[in-house]
Amino acid sequence: MNKESLANFLTRLHFCNNSKLESIDEYISMKNYILTLSDHKFYEKLREFGLYDKETS
């Protein structure tokens, strides 16, 4: 799966816990933030949400 698809998942998961999503701009802003993370920070985010587990790949 490419980085943009994973960023979409992470953004959706982020906002699942936040019922105050007011606009699509807020969603896009969060997605762009995730896409600009360094590879190390990006993979930390994946691990945080349980999406990067080498044993289940």
Image (cartoon, helix red, strand yellow):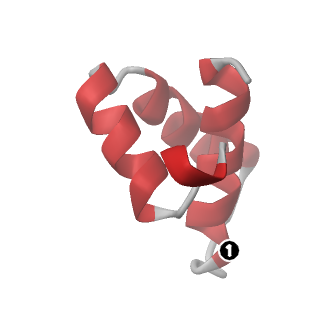
Q: Is residue 51 above or below residue 34?
A: below
Q: Nearer the viewer, residue 43 or 21?
A: 43
Residue displayed at 32% across by 46% down: 44
- Find residue 28 and report its image quarter: top right
| Whole-percent x, y for residue 50 in the image | 53, 63
Q: Secondary structure at mark 1?
A: helix
Q: Nearer the viewer, residue 16 or 1?
A: 1
Number of dots carrying numbers:
1
Quarter of the rendering occupied by the C terminus: top right
Position in image of residue 32 (x %, y %): 51, 27
- In the picture, the quarter occupied by the N terminus is top right
33 lies left or right of 23:
left
Would you identify the image quadrant in which residue 37 lies? Answer: top left
Camera-side residue of 47 and 32: 47
Q: Identify the residue at horizontal 60%, vertical 35% (top origin).
A: 7
- Residue, disc 1: 16
Decide if residue 52 is in sight here.
no
- Rendered position, 26 above or below 40: below
- Seen as rendered, the residue at the extreme front is 55
x then y, percent, for residue 5: 73, 29
Q: For the residue marked with disc 1, what is the amino acid?
A: Cys
Q: Is residue 29 visible?
A: yes
Q: Residues within 10 Å of mark 1 (few under 14, many from 20)?
A: few
Q: Position of residue 17 (x, y in %)?
A: 59, 80
